[in-house]
Amino acid sequence: MNDIIPPQPPKSFRVTIEVHTRLSRMDNKLLMVLKEQTENPTLQSISRNALKQLFLDGRVQIKGQRAKPSSAIAKGITYVDILGY
């Protein structure tokens, strides 16, 4: 099966999340992945409250659509774009 990789929006930072079982909330996993990555030091040191604000501002997207902290993540690979980074 070929994964279709959606185009990355300009001036955004892309995070690839791979899970083996469906997750009911994406915010905790996204925070963990951001802390583990090394390409963007600003997002690596982001706080839980700052991440929440990115969600509230609509700057976290999945497939070009605004994501919510309570958005589920399907089994497999999910591409999350954070606008402005």
Image (spheres, grey):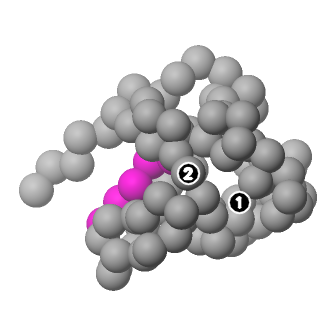
Query: On the picture, is 76 further left or further right than 39?
Result: left
Q: Position of residue 33 (x, y in %)?
A: 64, 65
Q: Main secondary structure of the magenta part?
A: strand
User: What span is in magenta?
Assistant: 76-80
Q: Which residue was labeled with disc 1?
A: 34
Q: Position of residue 51 (x, y in %)?
A: 77, 53
Query: On the picture, is 20 further left or further right than 11?
Result: left
- Residue 13 can be seen in this image: no
Task: Give me the residue at 22% from left, 48% from top.
Answer: 3
The span from disc 2 to disc 1 (Cα, nearest Å) is: 16 Å
> Callout 1, which amino acid?
Leu
Q: Residues within 10 Å of mark 2 (few under 14, many from 20)?
A: some
Label 2 SS: loop
> Callout 2, which amino acid?
Lys
In the depicted structure, whether residue 78 falls above or below residue 67: below
Q: Which residue was labeled with disc 2?
A: 68
Q: Nearer the viewer, mark 2 or mark 1?
A: 2
In the depicted structure, whether residue 41 falls above or below residue 27: above
